[in-house]
Amino acid sequence: MNKRYRPEHQETALEFRDVTYTHKGSQSAIFQHVQAEVKQGEFVSLLGPSGSGKSTFFRLAAGLSHPDQGTVFLHGSVPETRLGRVGYMPQQDLLLPWRTILENGMLPLEINGVPKKEAAHNVSAHLKAFGLDGVENQYPHELSGGMRQRVSFLRAVVGGSDILMLDEPFSALDSITRFMMQEWLLEQWQMAGQTLIFITHDIEEALFLSDRILLFTQPPIEGRFTEITVPLPRPRKENARDHPELLKLKRELINRMRGEGGII
């Protein structure tokens, strides 16, 4: 079903309200009174150069760091802890080499106390959808980079959070595999309906994947992020990369990032 982004119909999954944050030992803030919202079921990319605060945003959202001032809300409330409430998929797959693909997928469930038999059943039910059916008894070194990233994403999904943060998960892949994985990720996201927050340095990747893009330039970032709404219908396939609106936005983003001090 083709649809356009309609934020007015969605509840807020993640909110930064008046958030200020400074790294320990630094005299300069990364964020100053930052305001940001991510809607339930939305795909939002964080686009900007290294050192602009994208990873800090992730750490604050996941509860690994805490604001000096302001509040981080999950689904409209402030939980006692955000740890474990937000799923995370790192740039490197970080699969355990001594565990099979099935056992790697089971890891977050086991950590949460789920019995091994139940965890194995849960993960096995996802293998076909993730293109991993038939390789569950293999080990990470036997799979390609793209396949290992599928396992990493599966592990994030079965962890149970409906908010997933992906930190440049395809940056180490060759261009053909990266394009295929981007399309595969969109298919999985549209089926699951989870909220995805995606770090990237790649303007084209951000435009192809996202409902909205939050622009990160050199700190400090104050108030609301500059944001771009991507006006393309879903589902998106390979030919969407050449859509005139996307190409126009790509040129505008390159010029804007240069003008605001960002270097992609």
Image (cartoon, grey):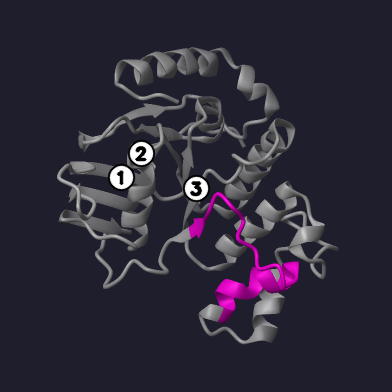
Residue type indicated by callout 2: Gly
Give the numbered dot on residue 167: 3
Q: Is 148 situated above or below 4?
A: below
Question: Dot 2: what SS?
Answer: loop
Looking at the picture, which amino acid does disc 3 mark?
A: Asp
Magenta residue check for 90 = yes
Is the Cβ of the residue at disc 3 closer than 8 Å to that at disc 2? no
Q: CA distance from mark 3 to mark 2?
A: 14 Å
Q: Residues within 10 Å of mark 2 (few under 14, many from 20)?
A: few
Task: Assign the N terminus to one quadrant of the image.
Answer: top right
Which numbered dot is residue 186?
Answer: none
Which one is earlier in the sequence, the residue at label 2 or at label 1? 1
Disc 1 marks which residue?
Answer: 37
Q: Position of residue 66 (x, y in %)?
A: 24, 60
Residue drawn at x 64%, y 38% as measured from the top left: 182
Of pointers 3 and 2, the one earlier in the residue sequence = 2
Label 1: how many residues lie within 10 Å, few (<14), some (14-19) or many (20+)? Answer: some
Residue at 21% x, 36% y: name it.
Answer: 220
Q: Quadrant of the C terminus?
A: top left
* Residue occupying the far front of the picture: 25
Residue 228 in the figure: left or right of residue 120: left
